[in-house]
Amino acid sequence: MEQTRRPFAGPPLTPRTAVLWSVLRAELDRRGDAELTVLDVGGGTGGFAVPLARAGHRVTVVDASPDALAALTRRAAEAGVADRIVAVQGDGDALAGLVEPAGVDLVLCHAVLEVVDDPAPVVAALATALRPGGAASVLVAGRAAAVLGRAMNGHLEVAAALAADPAGTAGPRDTLRRRYDAPGAAALLTAAGLTVEEIHGVRVLADLLPAAVADGQSASLVELELALAAQSPYRDLAAQLHLFARRPA
């Protein structure tokens, strides 16, 4: 039986995801009743893929972890959208060989560019995968937040090393290969031929507040995250930076 595309409501907004879903919801609303083809790179267990599939879109998730993809498959089946989600095991560095050019309306690339060997060819592959007019949602680790976070926790030498390193890492034991500021991340996307339309900070305050405050005033924190996300200097101090870009039509 053919599945009717539902209006997109999305999951409940949380302080860590509210900004992302607000931007994505605006794009889906802009597309009206169109069924979109979505590519979710590093989409793991389907935190974004499953809600998008439930709204009637078709999603391909590329992820290096077989365990994550197995969890995605179970989650999609439980949600009744197994026919709308395709799981592909693959590394972000090999993305160019995994997707067809100009076949995707929306690309999600969240928390990937900071761990791949070279982000430039990955972004180029994202741009190539998009149809003209298609959009890319790119989420990267913020450099300033990492420096401040380590300093506030008393790790001053690590904070100094991270601030001084051109890639924004704290040495060989760092779990990330690089971190970004807004101009650097935007330049990476622009070099691939994408037009950056919006830049937001994600988790401006969510990681700084005591758990009792964040959990006890979750709705107020969501509102504050949304209010500060696009404002400097708050945006630039966020744990993550979200760039929304488009391939020119």
Image (cartoon, rainbow, N blue to C red):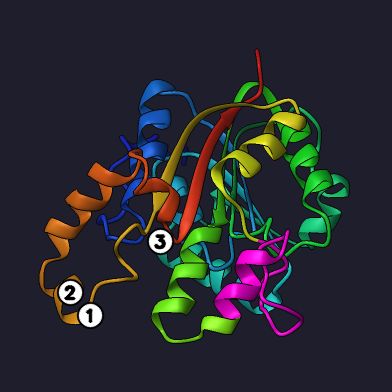
Q: Tell me residue 57's x, y (percent).
A: 49, 39
Which amino acid type corresponds to the residue marked 3 in the rendered image? Ala
Residue 67 seen in the figure: yes
Q: Secondary structure at mark 2?
A: helix
Mark 3 burial class by Cα count in 10 Å: few <14, some 14-19, many 20+:
few
Q: Give yes or no for residue 72 being in the magenta stretch.
A: no
238 versus 150 height, above or below: above
Residue wearing tag 1: 211
Cβ atoms at labels 3 and 2 below 8 Å apart: no
- The residue drawn where x is 83% and y is 55% is 118
In this view, the residue farthest toward the right is 97
Cβ atoms at labels 1 and 2 below 8 Å apart: yes
Spatial separation of the CA atoms under disc 3 and disc 1? 30 Å
Residue wearing tag 2: 215
Residue wearing tag 3: 79
Q: Quadrant of residue 171?
A: bottom right
Of marks 3 and 1, which one's residue comes earlier in the chain? Answer: 3
Of the pair 2 and 6, the residue shown nearer to us: 6
Looking at the rendering, the stretch of residues picked out in magenta corresponds to: 158-178
103 to the left or right of 29: right
Q: Nearer the viewer, mark 3 or mark 1?
A: 1
Q: Nearer the viewer, mark 1 or mark 2?
A: 1
In this view, the residue farthest toward the top is 249
Spatial separation of the CA atoms under disc 1 and disc 2? 6 Å
Give the quarter of the figure containing the C terminus.
Answer: top right
Q: Secondary structure at mark 1?
A: helix
Residue 51 seen in the figure: no
Count the labels in the image.
Answer: 3
Q: Quadrant of residue 16?
A: bottom left
Of marks 3 and 2, which one's residue comes earlier in the chain? Answer: 3
Of the pair 132 and 154, the residue shown nearer to us: 154
Which amino acid type corresponds to the residue marked 2 in the rendered image? Asp
